Image (cartoon, rainbow, N blue to C red):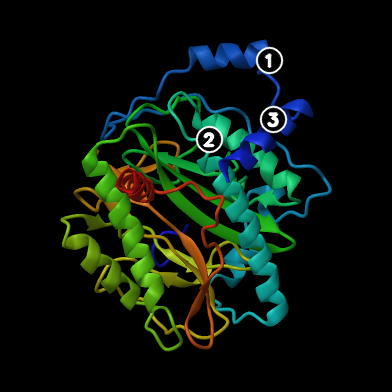
């Protein structure tokens, strides 16, 4: 995601058992790597909250038969840097390619979401995301994008976005965003969700729910002729009335054959985004909502963006396609998606009332 104005659970358990049976679990680290892990200490830095970086394993490889974006070997997205300001109107063939990439991305995120529980490290989630992408003939788009070292982004608690998966175990009461993008047959499909880790406090639950609601309200307004800048007005209105703030440093973006391109889609009100929605345009909407201040700070890894006050942040993202009459959510949730906490709460109440 660019800086603004830059360019059925059972099924999943069965799949994991099959992977274990086939010996697809990642190998244990060698003794030297294990020693480096034990010796790791967070760098000195004025951290804003309680979170600290942990050991990050070396970058993983992708088999030769998987089609790769231009930055896979060099870390430099040359085509994106050349064409970042170009708004692409997709033809039907391109739409089908993007739709397939988004379908695969949704499958991978759903599987990753079901891994979230206390004691699981974000590194373990990244290992499986990497494997699931390759199983589906896809390249994990974040890998080596501007030298990003992992196959997905994992952002716990005060991390706004671009968190690097590492050896820190998720803890009871955490929230964590998992951001998945896959590159399949020449197209990128991008989405993310924020998950609860065990029992979470009510304030964090409300933040997560409000963030999702703001995304869906913005998507509901998407149609030909709608001003790109007005998505931010809708998102800000919904979140500000609950005393939350909208991050301004990062935005949604065009997507397709390029990971990031025009149009930029800011999520805050009174932004300067140009243009209107047109049929055939595809882009992400991905509001990052903070519990208090909207301001951010970046760790020394030059990726991890955290809230300036150390308070929590949540995010949700969909890739959408503008149609002749509205929009299509290409990364829509499915029956395999991990239920939201408010869906589980409603189901529990309905079961109690039926007894």
In the image: residue 270, left or right of residue 279: left
Q: Compute the Cα span from label 1 to label 2.
A: 25 Å
Secondary structure of residue under mark 2: loop
Nearest the viewer among 319 and 352 is 352
Find disc 1 in the rendering and name its residue: 30
Secondary structure of residue under mark 1: loop
Secondary structure of residue under mark 3: helix
State which quarter of the image contains the C terminus: top left
Q: Can see residue 11?
A: yes
Residue displayed at 44% across by 83% down: 223
The circle drawn on residue 210 is none
Find disc 2 in the rendering and name its residue: 115
Mark 2 or 3, which is nearer the eye? 3
Corner quadrant of residue 317: bottom left
Q: Compute the Cα span from label 1 to label 3.
A: 25 Å
Q: Position of residue 217 (x, y in %)?
A: 34, 69
Q: Position of residue 85 (x, y in %)?
A: 52, 74
Give the mark, 1 or 3, whose residue is nearer the N terminus. Answer: 3
> Is mark 1 in CB contact (under 8 Å) with mark 2?
no
Find disc 3 in the rendering and name its residue: 17
Residue 209 against residue 169 in the figure, above or below: below
In the image: residue 270, left or right of residue 265: left
Give the mark, 1 or 2, whose residue is nearer the N terminus. Answer: 1
Residue displayed at 63% across by 60% down: 103
């Amino acid at each position: 995601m660019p800086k603004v104005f830059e360019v059925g659970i059972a099924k999943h358990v069965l799949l994991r058992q099959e992977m274990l049976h086939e010996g697809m679990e990642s190998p244990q680290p060698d003794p030297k790597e294990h020693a480096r892990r034990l010796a790791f200490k967070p760098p000195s830095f004025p951290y804003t909250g309680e979170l600290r970086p942990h050991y990050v394993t070396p970058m993983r490889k992708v088999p030769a038969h998987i089609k790769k974006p231009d930055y896979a070997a060099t870390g430099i997205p040359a085509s994106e840097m050349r064409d970042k300001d170009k708004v692409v109107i997709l033809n039907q063939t391109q739409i089908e390619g993007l739709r397939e990439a988004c379908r695969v991305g949704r499958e991978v995120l759903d599987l990753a979401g079901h891994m979230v529980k206390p004691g699981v490290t974000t590194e373990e989630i990244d290992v499986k995301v990497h494997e699931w992408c390759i199983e589906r003939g896809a390249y994990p788009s974040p890998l080596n994008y501007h030298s990003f070292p992992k196959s997905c982004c994992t952002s716990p608690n005060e991390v706004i976005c671009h968190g690097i998966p590492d050896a820190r175990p998720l803890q009871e009461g955490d929230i964590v965003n998992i951001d998945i993008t896959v590159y399949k047959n020449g197209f990128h499909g991008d989405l993310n969700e924020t998950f609860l880790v065990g029992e979470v406090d009510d304030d964090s639950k409300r933040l997560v729910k409000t963030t999702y609601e703001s995304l869906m309200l913005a998507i509901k307004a998407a149609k030909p002729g709608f001003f790109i800048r007005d998505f931010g007005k809708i998102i800000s209105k919904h979140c500000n009335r609950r005393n939350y703030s909208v991050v301004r440093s990062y935005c949604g973006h065009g997507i397709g054959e390029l990971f990031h391109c025009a149009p930029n889609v800011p999520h805050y009100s009174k932004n300067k985004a140009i243009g209107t929605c047109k049929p055939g345009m595809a882009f992400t909407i991905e509001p990052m909502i903070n519990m208090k201040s909207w301001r951010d700070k970046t760790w020394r890894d030059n990726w991890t963006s955290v809230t300036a006050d150390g308070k929590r942040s949540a995010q949700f993202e969909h890739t959408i396609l503008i149609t002749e009459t509205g929009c299509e959510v290409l990364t829509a949730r499915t029956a395999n998606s991990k239920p939201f906490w408010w869906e589980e709460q409603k189901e529990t109440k309905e079961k109690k009332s039926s007894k």
